[in-house]
Image (cartoon, rainbow, N blue to C red):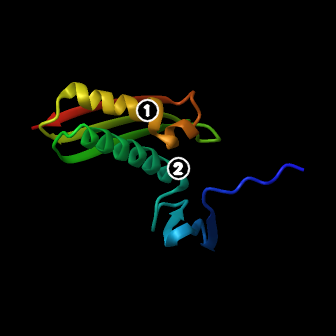
Amino acid sequence: MTPTPKADFTVNLTWQGEQRFSAASDGGVSAILDGKRGVGPSPVQAVAFALAGCMAIDVVDVIEKGRLPVKALTCDMRVFRADGTPRKITAFDLHFVVTGDVPEDRIARAIELSREKYCSVWHSLNPAIDFKTSFTVNP
């Protein structure tokens, strides 16, 4: 008999009525998911937050490991969904704005490393999703 692998983490959802669920994970992490987007992100919005967050964390980490002075980083993501059911995500367009004296080629490389190697969220999604990235540098 093959042993059951140990989970990396667990998630628990508790229905709060309507389309709302309280979500909890290991270490006291919690959120509200709301299909109507009234008091929290919808599950699809949560996926977009996760992808943008994962990429942003990687990009800052790679740039800082290169000993470059990042003063700020923001990102904006446009998410496109199919018209019919299921309204799956068909494309992401993620734009970073990096503030600091960071050469453009280093930012481009950090984004590439995140996308091709490090971002576990991106690598968990359907590879057929169109994913565009871009950036702007503010000195």
The part of the image, by quadrant, that contains residue 104 is top left
| Image position of 36 (left or right of 10) | left
Give residue 14's position: percent from left, percent from top: 63, 72
Q: Does residue 89 appear anywhere in the picture?
A: no
Against 102, residue 5 (above or below) is below
- Viewer-proximal residue, 26 or 124? 26
Give residue 93's position: percent from left, percent from top: 38, 34
- Viewer-proximal residue, 8 or 23? 8
Q: Residue at x 39, y 41 (%)?
A: 55
- Viewer-proximal residue, 39 or 107? 107
Q: Earlier in the sequence, mark 2 or mark 1?
A: 2
Against 90, residue 15 (above or below) is below
| Image position of 61 (left or right of 16) | left
Numbered label tally: 2
Q: Residues within 10 Å of mark 1 (few under 14, many from 20)?
A: many
Give residue 112's position: percent from left, percent from top: 37, 28
Using the numbered discs, state the Cα–Cα distance from disc 2 to disc 1 in whole angstroms.
Answer: 20 Å
Give residue 43's position: percent from left, percent from top: 54, 54
**Of the two numbered discs 2 and 1 in the rendering, the one whose residue sits closer to the viewer:** 1
Q: Which residue is mark 2?
A: 44
The amino acid marked with disc number 1 is Arg
| Image position of 33 (left or right of 104) | right
Q: Residues within 10 Å of mark 2 (few under 14, many from 20)?
A: some
Which label number is shown at residue 26?
Answer: none
The amino acid marked with disc number 2 is Val
Q: Which residue is mark 1?
A: 115
Instruction: Spot the residue most to the right.
Output: 1
Against 37, residue 104 (above or below) is above
The quarter of the picture where the C terminus appears is top left
